Amino acid sequence: MFKMTQDSIERTSQELVTATSRVKRGLAEMLRGGVIMDVVNADQAKIAEDAGAVAVMALERVPADIRRDGGVARMSDPVLIEEIQNSVSIPVMAKARIGHFVEAQILESMAVDYIDESEVLTPADEAHHIDKWAFRVPFVCGATNLGEALRRISEGAALIRSKGEAGTGNVVEAVRHLRAILGDIRKIGQADSAELYAWAKELRAPYELVAEIANRGELPVPLFCAGGLATPADAGLVMQLGAQAVFVGSGIFKSSDPAKRARAIVEATTHYKDPAILAKVSRNLGPAMVGIEMDSVDLHMAERGW
Amino acid sequence: MATHPVRLPDDLFGLSHLVIPGGESTAISKLMYSSGLVEAIKDAIRDGLAVFGTCAGMIILASEILGGRDDQVRLGAIDITVARNAFGRQVNSFETQLSIKGLDDVAMQAAFIRAPVVTRVGGDVDVMASVDYDFGNGTVSVPVVCRNEKVLVTSFHPEVTNDSRLHRLFLNDF
């Protein structure tokens, strides 16, 4: 039987430490099993939160519009980010251009919860990604293969996502990137100690991270999926392949009924192993975004970054 | 000890202990309603299920929520008031060492991530650990581990460290 006790709690002196790898990666851990939705304004952010999004990603234009309109895509107007922060209680992420550490400094000063150093925006530096260790805010970065993922982690990324091919409504590239990353992790799990050095050379990644993967059997940070997801079944597919959460961009707000599709993708991501529930939530969603076949894609965003 | 994830009411069958982990309490609420878990968990708690809630789990188990959405789940299984995200945004997330009453003398490393703040504790609730925190008006003592007979709550995340002492306490003492 539980009894109340009145003795005082003895304490050691408490030092509070912020911006550790554990709290940076920890927020990503808390988003696992959830859906992060691209939004361009406060109204869309509210629809996302109402639908059960675990976070929203603020950006200037959704990728499908960036493809259609062209031009240089940059960080959002701070006013829009602030309006989004004030309109929802879930974490707010925002995109900065690859290598544009000043956009990242601005986003950090606004206390966004995560910065996405994103290939969806026009890169600002053709040789260098941002030194992410220099920031208190955690970063998510895209990757098309394991070497790229490990290079981003060595630069300080606290979360990796597949790049996919954003704004196409076509999941094929996201599947390719997930399989590439997870397939190589499985192979490294079988490698002997000498082979780990060859893996590090082949992946152009630090040996220490390769050894850590051999040891853990997974990345040292969470792995989410992004790029081209448009349906509840797409979410189920990438979750069953081994993604731990999904980002959905144009797929929601370029569909005919965003609120309903957003709710359905949230349900699908939670119940990803249950085809009966996937069938139920896939009914009567109206037309999905039209989508583009890869042969007719002119701008390959996934090739940005190195 | 056998464990399995709970996504649907049928998953509660045969459970003696339930963990409601960290996450976003608003998103978890939506999924608990659509799956029928809200009523099922309330019934199970009434029938003696022990529950351990961390961060979002603490919010969902609390009797009063400040800064929440009107439509979010409030199970009222422990008489505390919590303010969501009241330690601030992610840049304010922190780690510290805690001495926890009922555990051995070794301090526990605790990660607070956009954590809730307990602002009131009811008469039948035991505070097992606190942190001294300055919200801008001088340092105050904030409860961060609380319990009653069947419910244990923490505003930090024991699930992101390798220290399982609180989980052991939950299994042995609840």
Image (cartoon, coloured by chain):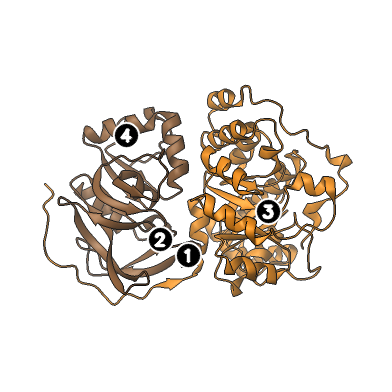
- Secondary structure at badge 1 equals helix
Q: Colour of chain B?
A: brown
Rendered image: mark on residue B41: 4
- Secondary structure at badge 2 equals loop
Name the residue carrying label 2.
Answer: B161
Name the residue carrying label 3.
Answer: A59
Label 3 to label 2: alpha-carbon separation: 33 Å
- Residue A29 seen anywhere in this rendered image of the structure: yes
Residue B34 in picture, x, y percent from top left: 45, 30
User: Of residues A105 and A298, which is closer to you in this image?
Assistant: A105
Mark 3 and mark 2 on one chain: no
| Snapshot quadrant of residue A145 | bottom right
Residue A14 in picture, x, y percent from top left: 32, 74
User: Of residues B38 and A50, which is closer to you in this image?
Assistant: A50
Chain under disc 3: A
Residue A78 in picture, x, y percent from top left: 64, 61
